[in-house]
Image (tube, rainbow, N blue to C red):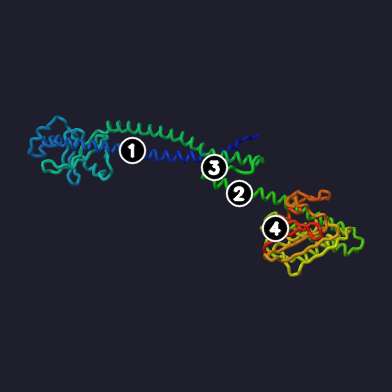
Amino acid sequence: MRFGLNFKPKKRLLTRMFLTSLSIIALVGFGLAWLVNLLHAQNNYNEETAQLIAEIPKVAAELKEHDLIPETSEWLDENNTPERYVIASCDQNFKQVWTSSLAVDKGLFDTCERFDEIRNDSPPYYLNLADNKGYFIYLLSVEIAKNQYNLLVMKDAEKLEKEMDKFSRRTYFRLGLVLALALVLLISAGYWGMRPLVRMRNELDSVNSGKSTGLSQDYPVELEGVTQALNQLLVQSSAQQQRYQNAMNDLAHSLKTRLAAVHAITDDATLDKQATSEKIMEQVSQMDQLVKYQLKRAMLGRKGLKQEQTQVAPLVNQLSQMLFKVYREKQVEFTANIPIEHVFPGDKGDLMELCGNLMENAFKLCISQVRVSASYNDAGEFELIVEDDGQGVEESIRKKIIERGVRADTQKAGQGIGLAVCNEIVISYNGKLSIETSELEGAKFRITIPI
């Protein structure tokens, strides 16, 4: 049996940020350190060159000793010190024309030619010469006693290299301290910067567990767009869930009446088998339309359904025939005052929900009369009125009964969502549902919708 470990580290945004930031800081830091060392070397070179220029009289004294310049001034005698230099004199083409005694002792006879190969580089100039030692070369283009000289002064590089190595070590040590401090600051900044994200995760866990409904608002500016989008998504998700729940409740409420109509049709002894089948198929067709309507409403919401116009009279007549079957024992006197040309400014499913719920309530609660009318009022609005001769609705509860779950009549079976559905539909069309007292002495439901 073989066992294998498949360890895959989790991807961490904080680790990526640390590595990226530290890499950038290290790259810039080492670049600056290299530049500092280079500038230090160039500065040393320039200082040494300036010092050598200051010592030109001493150099000239050595040239005089070898009879390379005439005695034209007393300053040569004053600077005739025993100090000696490793020097090579070059002509304009950097051919070596003279070598100092110290340079001769070291066998440095090709210094000018070798310097000519690197003289176009940036100082400091460094060469390994014939004695296999390293030298820093200082070029002095000077005029002595009206004679032009290209002098190469050579300094043993060992001492200077030690000093420069010491300087470099100090520079890189300081860079290490800076990088360590930068790492500490990066870790602190990273965890400080990630705290809002940790907080967001905790709040999302709280939302997921049902302890809260959204994210708080006091996030940094950079996260405001994310939190607003998440809150909007949560609101939409909650609204979608509520819409699905309402749609299912409304579907159950609507199907209840159709199922009752089917039950009444099957019990109607006056219908033959063919008529019974036709009536049942008509109710099944309405059920199919209701299912499609409620599913569409659940997906799009009410506003997504306002797309067409629907004739009112045929639909009211169809619903009344169904309700006659359901409430046939009441012998309801039904009156419809609806011109055939009048249309509802919206979806057929919405009109079926409105008329179905209001007419069913009217048939259920009336004594013997139900009246439905549709018209266009003087304000240019579509107006639908459903009234009955029942007990009516007390004025104190007229606003409450259009809320889900609130019922005016608790003596009869029902879920208390029919009027709430009607009110939601009417509001989606920017309309108004009002409850009044009918001339029939019962309830009068008035719907007005802008055209």
Disc ID at residue 232: 2
User: Could you say whether the residue bearing mark 4 is in a helix, strand or loop?
Assistant: strand
Q: Residues within 10 Å of mark 3 (few under 14, many from 20)?
A: some
In space, the residues marked 1 and 3 are separated at their CA atoms by 43 Å
Q: Quadrant of the N terminus?
A: top right
Between discs 3 and 4, the one toward the N terminus: 3
Between discs 2 and 3, the one toward the N terminus: 3
Q: Which residue is mark 1?
A: 36
User: Could you say whether the residue bearing mark 3 is in a helix, strand or loop?
Assistant: loop
Between discs 2 and 4, the one toward the N terminus: 2
Q: Are marks 1 and 2 in contact (CB under 8 Å)?
A: no
Q: Quadrant of the C terminus?
A: bottom right
In space, the residues marked 3 and 4 are separated at their CA atoms by 40 Å
Between discs 1 and 3, the one toward the N terminus: 1
At x 18%, y 36%, the residue is 54
Q: Amino acid at mark 2?
A: Gln
Q: Are marks 2 and 4 in contact (CB under 8 Å)?
A: no
Q: Which residue is mark 4?
A: 432
Q: Which residue is mark 3?
A: 219
Q: Amino acid at mark 3?
A: Tyr
Q: Quadrant of residue 338?
A: bottom right
On screen, residue 414 above or below 387: above
What x and y, as percent, mark residue 271? 90, 63
Q: Amino acid at mark 1?
A: Val
What x and y, as percent, mark residue 117? 26, 44
